[in-house]
Amino acid sequence: MSLDNTVLHIADVHKSFGGLHALSDIDLSVKEGTTHAIIGPNGAGKSTLLNVCIGRLIPDRGAVIFDGEELTGKSPHEINQAGVARVFQTPEIFTELNVLDNVIVPILSKRDGSYRFNPMKSLKQRRGAYDEAMHLIEDVGLNPKDMSGSLSRGDKRRLELAMCLSQHPRLLLLDEPTAGMSRHDTNSTIDLLKKIKERGMTKVVIEHDMHVVFSLADRISVLAEGRIIADGTPEEVKNSAVVQEAYLGG
């Protein structure tokens, strides 16, 4: 950990796809315990940046440093084991399992250190995993017996958050966490993410809904055409003429 409490540092990251420069000169620091939002129009490079952070894409140049350790070149599984979890735009859950088993699976995986855990060993661990899973499910307000495939989009998001929290990450990356939700589900998700923040967890949030962004963010970075055009507090970004012209629309 650096002296200024930076937990995630993205240093001079570049990424191109053929002749398209998806990311250029990206320098970004995220402080521990904060919620850092990344906003920008479609095609700005936001999801590409998150995919670089979790190892799904390797940058052409630059580095991603988490808690003083370089993540560049590591696999998504290695990055997850280092303490970084991601919530996807479309919830990634096991739709054929109930809520309880969805949360138990990543708990056992984390304890075993692999996504291929020994079934007999897992059975011995299941009692402790059950207690932990039930606590997390209660925190997010779900019924452990409900089948996950029949949940509303908002509840699927709550389940995915419980699955991520079961891994005890230090950094949570959220890609459009309220996409496709009703206003009621959006506000419930905001409340849940605020509750998570009270635990001191660092979050990076990509979001189009400015109501969500300004409800959650301590700091905002604005991407346009693969470059950061503004970075500051919500008030600074809201009042930025450059941001108004490029994204917020006057």
Image: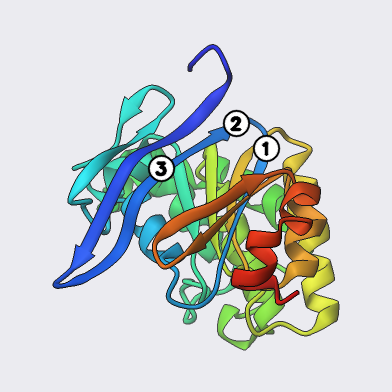
Residue depicted at 46% across the width and 63% down the height = 46
Numbered label attached to residue 110: 3
Query: Tags 1 and 3 in contact by the CB under 8 Å rule?
Result: no
Query: Tags 3 and 2 in contact by the CB under 8 Å rule?
Result: no
Dot 1: element? loop
Q: Nearer the viewer, residue 17 or 225?
A: 225
Residue 31 picture location, percent across and down: 60, 31
Q: Nearer the viewer, residue 165 or 75?
A: 75
- Left or right relative to 50: residue 31: right
- Tell me which amino acid carries mark 1: Thr
Q: Nearer the viewer, residue 102 or 69?
A: 69
Q: How many marks?
A: 3
How far separated are the C-alphas under marks 1 and 2? 6 Å
Dot 2: element? strand
Residue 152 picture location, percent across and down: 69, 84
Query: Tags 1 and 2 in contact by the CB under 8 Å rule?
Result: yes
Q: Nearer the viewer, mark 3 or mark 2?
A: 2
Q: Quadrant of residue 142?
A: bottom right
Residue 220 picture location, percent across and down: 65, 50
Query: Along the polypeptide, which appears first: circle 3 or circle 2?
Result: 2
Dot 3: element? helix
Residue position marked by numbered label 2 in the rendering: 31
Residue position marked by numbered label 1 in the rendering: 34
Residue depicted at 50% across the width and 75% down the height = 97
